[in-house]
Amino acid sequence: MNKYLKWSLIASGTFVALILLAILIVPRVVDVNSYRPQIEHQVSKATGRPFVLGGELDLSVFPWMGLTLSNLTLGSPEGFDQKEFITIKRFEVRVKVLPLFSRTIQVKKFVVDTPQIFLVKNTTGGTNWDMGQAQPPTPKQQPADKNTPAGEKAGALPFKALFVDEFAIQNGRIHYRDLGLKVTKEISNVTLTLEDLNLEDPIKIKFSAIADGHPLSLNGLVGPIGKEPGRGMIPLDITLKALDEITMKVKGGINDPITTPGFDLDLELSDFSPRKLLTALGNSTPILTADPRVLEHLQLNLHLKGDPGAVTVSNGTLILDDSTLTFSARAKDFSKPDLGVDMVVDKINLDRYLPPEQPPGSPVGTAKSPAEPSATARAKIDYSPLRELAINATLKIGSLVAKKAQLHEVQMTIKGKNGRFNLDPLSLDLYQGTIVSRADLDVTTDTPRVNLTVNAEKIASGALVADVLEKKIIQGQLDSTVGITLAGDTPGAIKKSLNGKGNLKFTDGAIIGIDIPGMVRNAKASFGLGERSTTQPRTDFAELILPFTVTNGLVDITGTALNSPLLRVTAKGTTDLAAETLNIRVEPKFVSTLKGQGDTKERSGLMVPVLITGTLDKPKFSPDLKSMVQSILPDEEALKSLVKDGKIDKEAIQKTGEDVKQLFKGFLPLKGNKE
């Protein structure tokens, strides 16, 4: 027995000695560089592009199995002026041999030195990184290996442990050119190092690069990745820094990235200046805003969780200058997006972020607006994405300034799917009153349609108009109901499609800029026929009612009435919204004395029609002299009898009624008349 054991040990020792001798002798006897042509041929055959091993191959076997390659070049396909696709100055890997027998991989060094990638897109859209569309055949499912150790899961790593002392990519470079757009981008000084690379401990990551001249870095911990990489939760705790302005922290984990990938992350974007960021990006045009102090602070925090089927955002907080936005969101079924959003804004002044107003007389301010493009010239809007969308979103704003209007407690909810959406409600408080509105949008066809209702109560119209238009036009409490429909997606089409009706009611106010009592009392001055008054014209009222109907963009205001203890005014006519023209006739009637408006005379029943013409931007006011004369002297012969040889017959006028006397006093003063 001892004899057999002795010979067995001798045989085993001899076998091990022969293996060690072969390991030491083979690298010195075999010229590995003689295999370079075969290696180059096989790589070229597999990739379909030239491959060159420009430097020497260095192979070691014991105690470290090592391979060193230098000056590797993988070329671009034919047809590209950039001949190189990938170049590597030096590649080195060293793995300890003996631990391999126990299925443990110990890597002493894995270094890629000066890798360069040249990406080119030519003028026809072709790219040099396209490896072709041919795919290798899908391997057939193999039956489970009966020799698989008990307790080892299918798909597990073929080794038990992994340890890497040095993993580094040094001096990397990525160069991109788009010949069609004439765009060039470059990422240089790419450096990546991994420390403590193993399966059971967190891996330290250090990455840095220069992107188009701007620094970029990423540092942190990833893992442990576990003995089944790609399965289970992989923790993350990394910090990204860019452009010396942005710092973003990401903490959480990625779950089952191979089988059913998902993520659960906290994101924190530290406070930075968007203005400075754009400057760092090389934006030569400064950002011009009405308030130059905005866009100086932006900060974001949120929790992000998702998988291939859905993504949710919770605990979101966005701080922009003086405004704070809290939000949450969800999205699922990405082929037909189903979105849910909830946002709350404490306060925001949108006017501060608009371009600054041009000074009066500037070329930009006086330039004519370009004509609306024709239907054939204008690109057709594709509404199919909206037909695929489902949404349920709410927005609340505590304080909002828009177009100088000051709004409070703004609330809106939008819901819809299959191309039909409704905004219900849209409510807000403004100028001591409230507005409650509802809108329905239908994009099931290529012509969008909107149904809109608006109800306003107790709005101080004077302050609202003064803030928005910076003009004093009207005063009084406004109550209104409006219901209209419209169709189209251009201003012209929308104006022509307007249909509906509404009613505006102003109480205890005044029309600023029109002096209807003065038009009667001093008609020549009021209509520019005589010396004007130095006081600002206005017409006070107890009630102003403006009912209207809209038919294909033509607004009819028949039934409009202004009432006060001293004055009654009715109006009728139309406004063409498409042409922006006015054609309105106003008929005032005094029912009592005009005390308080500069008159002490009794004027009962005197009618002075007023015509309003022109455009919405420049309305014109003039007396309807023809109608006024015809109402008092319907007989043309009677009028001729009062004027003889171009002169007024005073005696004939004295024999007429009071209305005729007042008419001639107002416009054709009698000789000796001191009024």
Image (cartoon, rainbow, N blue to C red):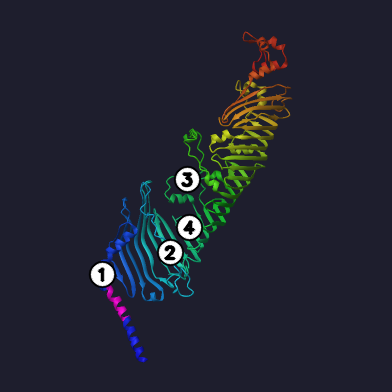
Tell me which residue sits at (36%, 74%) in the image.
97
Name the residue type under label 4.
Answer: Thr
User: Which residue position is annotated with label 2?
Assistant: 140
The earlier-in-sequence mark between 4 and 3 is 4
Q: Work out which quarter of the rendered image holds the N terminus and state it.
A: bottom left
Secondary structure under badge 4? strand
User: Which residue position is annotated with label 3?
Assistant: 287
User: Which residue position is annotated with label 4?
Assistant: 247
The earlier-in-sequence mark between 2 and 1 is 1
Secondary structure under badge 2? loop
Residue 587 drawn above or below residue 93: above
Distance between mark 3 and mark 2 Cα atoms: 59 Å
Q: Work out which quarter of the rendered image holds the C terminus and state it.
A: top right
Whether tag 4 and tag 2 are in contact, CB under 8 A, the answer is: no
Residue 73 percent location from the top left of the image = 31, 59
Distance between mark 3 and mark 1 Cα atoms: 65 Å
Residue 174 percent location from the top left of the image = 37, 56
Say which of marks 3 and 1 sits in front. 1
* Horizontal arrangement in the rendering, residue 207 relative to residue 336 (left or right): left
Magenta stretch, overall SS? helix
* Horizontal arrangement in the rendering, residue 585 relative to residue 76 (left or right): right
Q: Residues within 10 Å of mark 2 (few under 14, many from 20)?
A: few
* Horizontal arrangement in the rendering, residue 7 relative to residue 230 (left or right): left
Tell me which residue sits at (55%, 35%) in the image.
493
Say which of marks 3 and 2 sits in front. 2
The earlier-in-sequence mark between 4 and 2 is 2
Secondary structure under badge 1? loop
The earlier-in-sequence mark between 4 and 1 is 1
* Horizontal arrangement in the rendering, residue 665 relative to residue 10 (left or right): right
User: Which residue position is annotated with label 1?
Assistant: 31
The earlier-in-sequence mark between 3 and 1 is 1
Q: Could one spot residue 55 in this view of the protein? A: no
